[in-house]
Image: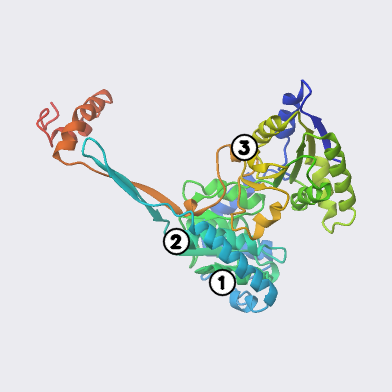
Amino acid sequence: MARHFDATKPQFDEVLTRFLAEDRGGGDDVFGVVKAILDDVHKRGGVAVADHTAKFDGLQIDPSTLESDNVSLHALAADCPADLRAAIDFAHDRIAAYHGAQRPADHRFTDDAGIELGWRWTALDSVGVYVPGGRASYPSSVLMNIVPARIAGVERIVMVAPAPNGELSPAVAYAALKAGVDEFYPIGGAQAVGALAFGAGALKPVDKIVGPGNAYVAEAKRQVFGRVGIDTIAGPSEILVIADASANPEWVAADLLSQAEHDPSSQSILITVDEAVGKAVDKAVENQLKTLATGERARESWVSHGAIILVRDRLQAADVANRIAPEHLELCIEDPDGLLPLIRHAGAVFLGHHTPEALGDYVTGSNHVLPTSRAARFSSGLGLYDFLKRMSVQRAGPHGLGVLAPAALRLAEAERLPAHARSVSIRTNRGRSDGH
């Protein structure tokens, strides 16, 4: 049974603060292990990647090409069932349409001083996509990471995915080909992140690394950030459901368990203004856990990190939700559009009783790579913008230069940067070109 909190009690703020601060990392300190692997890849390149791949995945790869004769995307994709290929195609097209609609426009304007200003959007040259491998892998993650990059216009998309003992999901292989991967290497773990960042064998370095992974992959991305860009440091999955008396407790329970089944470190929270709803959902969760194939880890997640929070009213519900800043937020209430304007912090919001979070994981078209661990307070989910850069553009003529020069010269003087001042004054009659 999950913990029950009452937001109407005086000490609730302190209780919630402690609850949100609880560690859900679920792993040992991996910093040193990851650093050693990255240093090895940086030093020995493809040989190091091959050694670590043989050690951790039991797969022999060529140190020069980083390929294996036992892993072929085209051969694997041929084994993907037809109905699953159709589902992947359907999801692909919806994801492409959603992210295509995000495309920003270049813009130019001229201000009152006659200065022409604006910005241009340009795509990254190359992106590395990390995909969890083996049998328990996710074609949806392939689509969510690769399709936006392709829509953005990234010229080179590299996918890495571990293939333990030569095993890789046919669905992942089909999704990769459907999404338009340019290069694929059957490598994973920190060594794959290192290869993407530093280059190794035939794999040339990329400009940005995206995609989910385990604690070692997350730490490796953290350590190479700055040399390359990254999307985010992903934590355990989260869902928060706000439900009122109009909600179906069985539906809400299923939604809470949809994230709890990911991992024992996942977190599922219910907020409700109706105590009876909380009790009904709690009972429904217990009943569903008895028959859920993933019930063991879902139960551990629910008991260790789950919560049911009773609130005074909708306003307090929104306030608590904003403090939690969840990855996924479902508004299973009578008037979700009325509450939405009060929601400031969430990775993705699902409105109404017929929009379970699982639809967003697969087929609404919205991206399921979202901020976790309260990062929704300051960041957004993966989207087209993550594969674009905004480049500012400006132009001044003689008149505009004359308007801007006095303030620029004064600021350069204040900052003791005479060459800055000279680069302005040399173009005007203000001051001497030698800086005196």
Picture layout, residue 84 above or below residue 13: below
- Please state which of residues 171 and 73 is positioned toward the viewer in this rendering: 171
Between marks 2 and 1, how big is the CA–CA gap? 16 Å
Instruction: Kindly identify the residue that appears in the image at 10 percent across and 29 percent down.
Output: 432
Amino acid type of disc 2?
Val
- First in sequence: mark 3 vs mark 2: 2
Q: Which mark is residue 154?
A: 2
Asked if the residue under mark 3 is in contact with the one under mark 1, i.e. CB atoms within 8 Å, the reply is no
Mark 3 lies on a secondary structure that is loop
Residue 195 in sight in this render: no
- How many residues crowd around disc 1 within 10 Å: few (fewer than 14), some, or many (20 or more)? some
Q: Is residue 425 visible?
A: yes
Estimate the x, y position of residue 252 in percent, counting from the top left: 78, 47
Dot 1 or dot 3: first in sequence order is: 1
The reply, left or right, for residue 299 in relation to residue 93 is right
Q: What number is the disc on residue 343?
A: 3
Inspect the image, locate mark 1, and give the three-letter code of the amino acid beneath it.
Answer: Leu
**Horizontal arrangement in the rendering, residue 296 relative to residue 121 (left or right):** right
In depth, the one of 401 and 93 nearer the eye is 93
Instruction: Tell me the mark number nearer the camera, choosing from 3 and 2.
Output: 3
| Labelled pair 2, 1 in contact (Cβ < 8 Å) | no
**Quarter of the figure that contains the C terminus:** top left
Q: Label 3 crowding class (10 Å Cα cut-off): few <14, some 14-19, many 20+?
A: some
Foreground mark, 1 or 3, reads 3
Q: How is the image coloured?
A: rainbow
Q: Residue 122: x, y in percent?
A: 38, 55
Numbered mark located on residue 177 in the image: 1
Give whichever of 100, 48 is nearer the camera: 100
- On screen, residue 4 versus residue 259, left or right, reads right
